[in-house]
Amino acid sequence: MTIVLITFVLTAAAILLALNFTAGEKQVEHQLPRLYGTSDPQFVRAMGSLLGPGIAGGNQVTELLNGDQIFPSMLEAIRGARRTITFETYIYWSGDIGKQFADALTERARAGVQVHVLLDWVGSQKIDASFLQEMEAAGVQVRKFHQPHWYNLARMNNRTHRKLLVVDGRIGFTGGVGIAPTWTGNGQDAEHWRDSHFRAEGPVVAQMQSTFLDNWLKVTGQVKHGEDYFPAIATAGTSAAQMFSSSPSSGSESMQLMYHMAITAAERSIDLSMAYFVPDDLSNQILLDALKRGVKLRLIAPGKITDTETVRAASRGTWGPLLEAGAEIYEYQPTMYHCKVMIIDNMMVSVGSTNFDNRSFRLNDEANLNIYDPVFAARQTRVFEQDLSRARRISLQEWQDRPLKEKLRERLALLLDSQL
């Protein structure tokens, strides 16, 4: 009887492990044919119709660089809320900045604002319990994404990596920032990371709200709608934009397809700011094809100051063919580089939570704001080049001459690429 029980437990554990290591959907296996470039109107039509929500005009998007700009803007919006706050994040830890957010959300809930907070169960493990108690006592609805229950054990590897804040249905924020001390400051040293976040106003904020409420519905079963969440939104600027999302439960491949479509359509340049860059074979081939047709590819990735040596090793193990084809690859030097920005042809910019790796493309819930505006793209290119000035270029010769120990570490790390 004991042997039978042990066998049953081990079999069940193996099945759960297998289920958690797969996305559960058919993976993208074939390269997209290149039918048009970014200058063709068909590119924008496809991006707004084939994969994502419609592209909305009349938006204003503002870049916020590092915690000293990001957190004051987010907190100011929260403190000015009159009707609703919806907030979803992967990382929420203890510390002074976490307390500031908890206090601001608590104060607004006590003032009668409807406040909904969705935290990833894994990413929020380091949050001070008193923060949660304070918020919930004031009426903040706090929920955990995929908190372990018998009915979702097969989805424990699916985390919400999204970073979304929507205030009164009119002001939205997204980007790479979590709520933790490492994101405070101005990227000035190893303890204060370099990251970007973005504030949006205009019709696209309704799409950001919808993205949050989709996961809120999955976790709580509650349908939130009406004017408090979706007010009439006036034109706020001149940028066209869309909020793009993906999830293993509803289109895990859509984010990868969006990246692939944009790269395949690129005519002149691709600039990637990527905290975690571990392309699979297909993604790598699409980048190589862009290089072969004369597109300039520049990548900034973390240097020796990183939060995960395994991912850095796996990333470096993929660089050879790209460097041989002419890609410019740089490692950021001053601190951990956590940005997630793609700029295509100085025309399209994609910002948000998505990294260029399998975990973002297939396993996590992600959300990116796509902006189609040459003026906005030019500003982000200037930011990219400011980061380049603080990064060190890696030559093909240097990559080829790296020590054997590093090559072995890279090979071992790449065995885990499906989970990175």
Image (cartoon, rainbow, N blue to C red):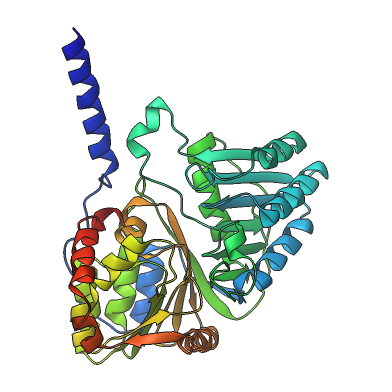
Instruction: Please tell me which residue lies in front, 165 or 243.
Output: 165
Q: Position of residue 222 (x, y in %)?
A: 57, 36
Answer above or below: position of 96 versus 151: below
Q: Is residue 330 left or right of residue 32?
A: right
Q: Quadrant of the N terminus?
A: top left
Instruction: Please tell me which residue lies in front, 157 or 97.
Output: 97
* Residue 333 visible within the image: yes
Q: Position of residue 254 (x, y in %)?
A: 33, 59
Looking at this rendering, what residue extends furthest in the right direction? 111
Answer above or below: position of 323 versus 233: below
Q: Position of residue 352 (x, y in %)?
A: 49, 66
Q: Please tell me in which quadrant of the rendered image residue 64 appears.
A: bottom right
Q: Residue at x 50, y 73 (%)?
A: 335
Answer above or below: position of 16 versus 249: above
Q: Is residue 19 left or right of residue 78?
A: left
Answer above or below: position of 105 versus 151: below
Instruction: Please tell me which residue lies in front, 275 or 290.
Output: 275
How many numbered discs, if any?
0
* Residue 83 visible within the image: no
Q: Quadrant of the C terminus?
A: bottom left
Q: Please tell me in which quadrant of the rendered image residue 233 appears.
A: bottom right
Q: Residue at x 29, y 69 (%)?
A: 315
Q: Is residue 349 left or right of residue 11?
A: right
Q: Residue at x 49, y 84 (%)?
A: 387
Q: Please tell me in which quadrant of the rendered image residue 292 appears.
A: bottom left
